[in-house]
Image: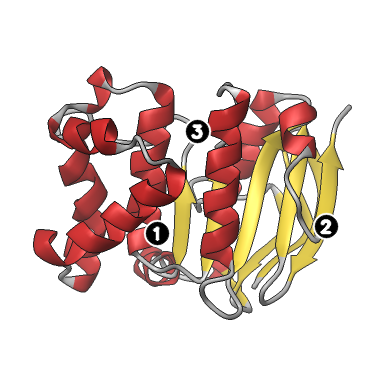
Amino acid sequence: MIRFERVTKGPIRNLSFDLGRGGTAKILFDSEDRKNILFGLLAGRQRPEAGKIFFFGEDLFAHAENERLALFRRIGVVPADGGLISNLKAWENLLLPAWYHHGLTAEQAEQPVAEIFEQLEAGEAGLKRRMGELPGQLSLYERRVVALARAMLMEPDILIYDFTFAGLERDAAQRLMNLTGEFHGRKAGRVSLYLCPDDAVSARLAADSTITLTQ
């Protein structure tokens, strides 16, 4: 589902790994700059200087841009800062990709989003009320919840988490971990790839394999 063959970009040198159907993996970093480069490669925003990147058995950069975009409709990405559009309300950010790609209406999205919030904790009613606010008015945790819900509505085959648990209180990080684990198991063959700082919080994250990219 994801394969890197001797990929080099800046400080990332000759990185190879293969993550098959249904697999989970975490990649640990001691440098956020290095993590950002890898995230850019995974998101198709940067080209490797050497090596090849495959999604679903397809060489990512052997395709024209419109063909790459078609591949990414099967891939969900949760950026560390949420990646929300600043002049759209949280609810509009959450719904936009599913509406654009799958024609999902607000009424159709309401129940699955409510279920996501319920899995986080019983007191998420306050978060529901904040869906009418702009991203700049939300906390980091709230922005990541919106980004998670946005990605999950697309029902991707691959979900890439970018420092999703970093910088949060222990309980908040654990709630998000539990949610991503439950979501992973909901669809046969789904792949989850976590980019994580090399810290105690990330050590609690269960994964089939761990890759450490440190000096």
Observer able to see residue 61? no
Q: Is residue 13 left or right of residue 157?
A: right
Report which quarter residue 106 is drawn in.
bottom left
Front residue of 157 and 112: 112
| x and y percentages locating residue 99 in the rendered image | 17, 63
Front residue of 134 and 53: 134
> Is 118 drawn above or below residue 182 in the view shown?
above
What is the spatial separation of the Cα atoms under label 3 and label 1, in whole angstroms?
16 Å
Q: Is residue 180 left or right of residue 101?
A: right
Residue at 38% from the left image edge and 65% from the top image edge = 69
Name the residue carrying label 1: 152
Q: Is residue 67 left or right of residue 96?
A: right
Q: Tell me the kind of residue under disc 1.
A: Met
Observer able to see residue 84? yes
Q: Name the quarter where the C terminus is drawn.
A: top right
What is the spatial separation of the Cα atoms under label 2 and label 1, in whole angstroms?
23 Å
Mark 1 residue element = helix
Name the residue carrying label 3: 80
Q: Name the quarter where the N terminus is drawn.
A: bottom right
Q: Tell me the kind of residue under disc 2.
A: Ser
Q: Tell me the kind of residue under disc 3.
A: Ala
Front residue of 101 and 51: 101
| x and y percentages locating residue 24 in the rendered image | 70, 61
Residue at 35% from the left image edge and 35% from the top image edge = 123
> Is 41 drawn above or below residue 99 in the view shown?
above
> Is 203 drawn above or below residue 71 in the view shown?
above
| x and y percentages locating residue 53 in the rendered image | 66, 62
What is the spatial separation of the Cα atoms under label 3 and label 2, in whole angstroms?
21 Å
Of labels 3 and 1, the one closer to you:
1
